Image: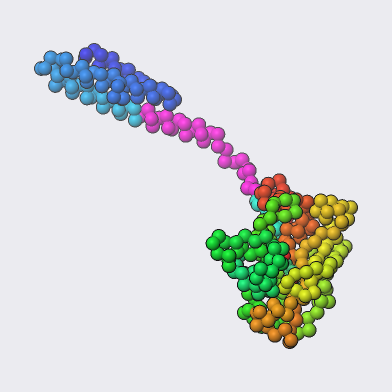
């Protein structure tokens, strides 16, 4: 056994490990519980009792030596690999640069709407997306069970028919008029929800901006001029705008607002349904019932209101022919708006 120990000690002293595999085979051979030194310890049982003490001491020394050597090899290997790592890292090379995100086209339109109406004296007010029946329907002159409620496919909160996801930003009109007396001039951009199938022209979640102006002697001509001015600021001087008679419970008279199709320039496309015109919202003179519901005297005050779609506006402004692109987060689509800045 002594000869074997001597040979092993020699081997231990000379061993080198230049990679992880060699280190692992060293561990298996000398350090592990199934290794050769453990085996020698087992053999002690067969040695003559008077030699055992001495042999045990020698084996313990050998074991200590193996463990020290193992630690040395680990350390040496670590230094080698960190040296080779740093050789690959050239700190003088120019950096790859970090790519910046860009403003989402819907945010860009939202900001621009706030800016244009802001210059006309409209201040921003926002309201809740989860709304009660009064603010989303009843105060806006939708009588209970009136078929006009069917115009907007509503997401109701389960088990409470009084609460719904707002179907339009017109709820903010009510919230503003309940809390303030005229003169009122407010703009309410926000997210709205309708139970509609998703297509190139429609989505169940989209955005609107609502304008409301209430004062003495406000007339339909004021509404038209405000929207003409807005359209030229938003889309440029060549845009055409038209009003089509329509019906909304909360306005009388009411009109739908069409913009000349800037996607196909009147040639005809899927978005204008080959008519050359795209509807971007509704408008009208605030119905006297609505003013009264909010505690405003309809004998003294009149007002106009309009609600327009942010998606529709963005589609016309940037010639986008599929509304789904706004929510798909395709980086190739979003990157095209990088020049809009932050
Ligand atoms: N709330 C209507 C809708 O979402 C749009 C609308 C029409 C808003 C006429 C108005 C308005 O303020 O006067 O369909």
- Dividing the image into four quarters, tell me where ligand 1 lies: bottom right
Quadrant in the picture for residue 119: bottom right
**Does the image show residue 101?**
yes
Where's residue 104, x and y in %? 68, 55
The residue at the point 38 percent across, 30 percent down is 74
Quadrant in the picture for residue 55: top left
Q: Dominant secondary structure of the magenta stretch? A: helix
Q: Is residue 55 left or right of residue 88?
A: left
Q: Which residues are drawn in magenta?
A: 72-99
Q: Is residue 186 magenta?
A: no
Q: Is residue 88 magenta?
A: yes
The residue at the point 51 percent across, 36 percent down is 86
Quadrant for the C terminus in the image? bottom right
The residue at the point 11 percent across, 17 percent down is 49
**Does the image show residue 130?**
no
Quadrant for the N terminus in the image? top left
């Amino acid at each position: 056994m002594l000869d074997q120990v001597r040979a092993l000690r020699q081997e231990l002293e000379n061993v080198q490990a230049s990679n992880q595999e060699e280190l692992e085979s060293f561990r298996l051979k000398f350090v592990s519980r199934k290794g050769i030194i453990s085996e020698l310890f087992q053999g002690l049982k067969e040695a003559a009792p008077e030699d055992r003490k001495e042999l045990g001491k020698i084996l313990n020394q050998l074991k200590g030596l193996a463990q020290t050597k193992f630690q040395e090899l680990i350390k040496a290997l670590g230094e080698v690999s960190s040296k080779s790592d740093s050789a690959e890292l050239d700190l003088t090379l120019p950096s790859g640069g970090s790519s910046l995100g860009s403003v989402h086209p819907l945010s860009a339109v939202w900001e621009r709407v706030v800016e244009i109406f802001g210059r006309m004296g409209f201040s921003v007010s926002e309201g809740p997306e989860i709304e009660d029946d009064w603010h989303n329907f009843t105060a806006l002159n939708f009588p209970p069970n009136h078929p006009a409620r069917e115009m907007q496919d509503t997401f109701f909160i389960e088990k409470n028919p009084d609460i719904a996801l707002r179907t339009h930003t017109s709820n903010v009109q009510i919230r503003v008029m309940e809390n303030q007396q005229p003169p009122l001039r407010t703009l309410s951009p926000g997210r709205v929800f309708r139970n509609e199938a998703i297509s190139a022209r429609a989505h169940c979640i989209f955005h609107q901006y609502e304008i409301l102006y209430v004062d003495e002697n406000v007339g339909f001509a004021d509404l038209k001029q405000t929207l003409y001015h807005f359209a030229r600021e938003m889309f440029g001087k060549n845009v055409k705008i038209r009003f089509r008679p329509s019906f909304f419970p909360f306005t009388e008279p009411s009109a739908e607002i069409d913009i000349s199709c800037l996607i196909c320039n009147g040639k005809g496309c899927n978005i204008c349904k080959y008519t050359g015109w795209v509807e971007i919202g509704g408008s009208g003179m605030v119905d006297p019932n609505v003013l009264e519901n909010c505690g405003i005297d309809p004998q003294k005050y009149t007002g106009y209101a309009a609600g327009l779609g942010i998606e529709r506006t963005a589609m016309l402004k940037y010639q986008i022919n599929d509304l789904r692109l706004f929510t798909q987060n395709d980086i190739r689509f979003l990157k095209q708006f990088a020049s809009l800045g932050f």
